[in-house]
Image: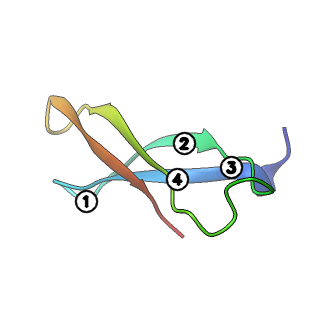
Amino acid sequence: MSQDNLVKLECTECKRVTHNSHKNKKTLKAIRLELSKFCKFCKKNTLHKETK
């Protein structure tokens, strides 16, 4: 995978970047990615949003 498909995911509660993910930029062009992931700082599943 190339680096231009790599996105950072930030926790919406503690505002820390805790995960990385790949994104298909041809199909998800204008949409920001939102996933429910486990945050190790909050110690629970929270919503993670794509950062710039």
Mark 1: secondary structure: loop
The span from disc 1 to disc 2 (Cα, nearest Å) is: 14 Å
Which residue position holds label 3? 6
Q: Are marks 3 and 4 in contact (CB under 8 Å)?
A: yes
Q: Is residue 21 above or below residue 12?
A: above
Mark 1 vs 3, N-terminal side: 3
Percent x, y for residue 32?
51, 61
Q: Nearer the viewer, residue 46 or 27?
A: 27
Q: Quadrant of the N terminus?
A: top right
Q: Position of residue 29 (x, y in %)?
A: 69, 64
* Type of amino acid at the residue the image marks with label 4: Lys
In three-dimensional space, the C-alpha distance between marks 1 and 3, rounded to whole angstroms, equals 19 Å
The residue positioned 75% from the left and 53% from the top of the image is 27
Q: Secondary structure at mark 4?
A: strand
Instruction: Look at the numbered discs 4 and 2 and tell me whether their residues touch, using CB distance below 8 Å.
Output: yes
Q: Which residue does the image show at 24% across and 31% down from the upper left? A: 40
Distance between mark 4 and mark 1 Cα atoms: 12 Å
Quadrant the C terminus occupies: bottom right
- Drawn side of residue 8 relative to residue 43, left or right: right
The residue type indicated by label 3 comes to Leu
Lower sequence index among marks 1 and 2: 1
Q: Which residue is mark 1?
A: 15
Residue at image position (85%, 46%) is 2
Q: Which residue in the structure is indicated by mark 2? A: 20
Say whether disc 4 or disc 1 marks the residue closer to the N-terminus: 4
Question: For residue 12, which quarter of the picture?
Answer: bottom left
Q: Which mark is residue 8?
A: 4
Give percent across and percent down for residue 18: 38, 43
- Classify mark 4: residues with Cα within 10 Å, few (<14), some (14-19) or many (20+): some
